[in-house]
Image (cartoon, coloured by chain):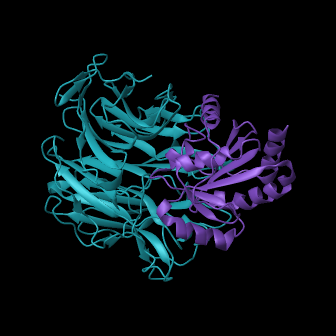
Amino acid sequence: MTVLRIAALGLALLGAGSLSGVADAAGQIRLATAEEFSASLGKLRGKPVVLNLWGTWCAPCLKEIPDLMQLQREFADRGVELVAVAMDDPADLAMVDGFRKRFFPEFDSYIRNEPDMDTLVSVVDPAWNELLPTTYLIGKDGKVVKRVQGKKSIEDFRSEIRALLR
Amino acid sequence: MGHSLICSTSMLLLSLSTGLSFAAPVAVTDGTRRAQAPEVTVGGDGSIHVIWLDKGVVGTADRKGSDRSGGHSHQSWTDLMYARSDDGGRSFSQPVRVNREEGEVWGFSVAKPQVGVGQGGVIHVAYPANSISSVTGKAVASSLYVRSLDGGKTFSEPLQLNADVPGDLSDLVHGGLAQAQVFGTMTVSTAGDVYAFWLDTRDMTPERMLSSTYLRASHDNGATFGSERLLYQADACPCCQLTALADGSDRVVLGSRMVGEDNLRSPTVSISMDAGDSFSARVAAQGTPWKMNGCPLKPTALAASGNFLHTLVHNGAEDPPGLLYSRSTDGGQNFEAAIRMHPEAAVSDSPSLAASGQTLHAFWHAKLDGPRRIFTRSSTDNGANWGPVLELDAPEGTGSYPEAAALPGGGAVVVWQQGEQILAAVVGGQ
């Protein structure tokens, strides 16, 4: 699939530098430009990554976030990392963080620090079609293995992660 | 692969492969401010009218509304701007703010305000706005209407189209809003009718996260409006902006994305032949069935010419995901098999159609191997055959969210976001 080939190329170019000004503690909302996001993903090379795009306005997104957090705990010993990015407007950082604290206090997420959603998502998927939720299963080599769109059940995601780990 | 434009003069570009002419892009905004979500319409005298969202000076954040909403903030606090061209798109007037209350406008590139021109050059605008519900005291987003009787120099006090309703869905919708009556559209007929539609969360439940479709109509050029009316209850994609068109007859066409069993999200068309009093059952445009439990943010672009009715929609079930064109030759009762509008694109989206007589222009943004750019195709036989995909001449960088309107003489004017600037260009015509 063209999308995945291009995404693999994009991830291969990721740097390994740290994300400037961003703490590593869980349970935060952190602004990230495309460049910062790319560098942050680069630091996760060698680990399987579940990358979830969500938005506060996207009800199906909100329903699946607890499932993804549950799966992160389940697969922690296999090194699986959950990376989330809110597609809300960066000016709404405080609102998104308040939303997170209220509903998912342990949820760690970036929020785009770009004028449009596509610029940041293009780091992993140059052909993203602006649909939420979108989740990418990314292998240890940084290649996008699968793009999943729409809310899925926890069983579906569990199967996808197991396939990613094979 | 799109053909590039290969002949340029100071004002006119020409694709040698098709003979289709393009005027060089003209700046509607000066690039110093964050502009997005342009919309365009053409008056009966050929005047071009553009509106867009203004999110402040480039490099600054949105205004925040926390002082008005009890500490709760919204996704979007912007202004709505208007400009016009009376020289065929060669130049545009200085922007005028449409909304009276600074920063009240809610909206973004897939939830755009709408503009239309009616009898006597009256300019009609419908837009979503932040407000506080008179029923619940909670932050909500509502649909407002204003008009200009002086050619766009000033706009009226806003009329709230939707009723404030009970219920607090702030845990469910739109970043914490208690209700949202937005993602609407408006169409204006040459007979003085104004039809304003919106997607409404009042019937939404945690188990059924779908919107109802409401209409409010004016038959006196926007002076007065009838009561709001429910058209379809809790069966529409809540984030797929409605589309509509009306002509000088009593026909009104509504485009919406209906959600069926197993989250089948179908682009549909419904027709009123009695000036909005009643609408037909919705007919789905053709295309691969797309089942998806999420927020597609995908409208159903419409155009019509007589009994020919055209749709252009994004379909995420395609691989790669992209735009499908489908037409009806019997006034919307049946649709022919769909064709891919831009098969070579990695992704294509944000469709707009403009029809004049048998000529049909399609615009969209797509990605080949770089950022989004604006593309077009034209048909001169009511969509039976299409010319090649052409990329619009535009500066380097990202071009996105085009909207188009037909011009007299078979051409079209298209406006779009180029970075954070609004550009316009005239395509085709005599």
Image position of B385 with respect to B106: above or below = above
> Dividing the image into 4 quarters, which one contains the N terminus of chain B?
top left
Image position of B165 with respect to B321: above or below = below
Q: Quadrant of residue B290?
A: top right
User: Left or right: where does residue B378 sit relative to residue A150?
Assistant: left
User: Left or right: where does residue B125 sit relative to residue B150?
Assistant: right
User: Left or right: where does residue B244 sit relative to residue A20?
Assistant: left
Residue B326: % across, % down: 47, 33
Q: What chain is the cyan one?
A: B
Image position of B138 with respect to B331: above or below = below
Residue drawn at 75 percent across, 51 percent down = A81
Residue A150: % across, % down: 65, 49
Quick one: A143 or B163, which is closer to the camera? Answer: A143
Q: What chain is the purple one?
A: A
Residue at the top extreme?
Answer: B17
Residue B289: % across, % down: 62, 38
Quick one: B274 or A80, which is closer to the camera? Answer: A80
Residue B136: % across, % down: 51, 82
Quick one: B135 or A86, which is closer to the camera? Answer: A86
Residue A105 visible in the picture = yes
Q: Quadrant of residue B329?
A: top left
> Dividing the image into 4 quarters, which one contains the C terminus of chain B?
top left
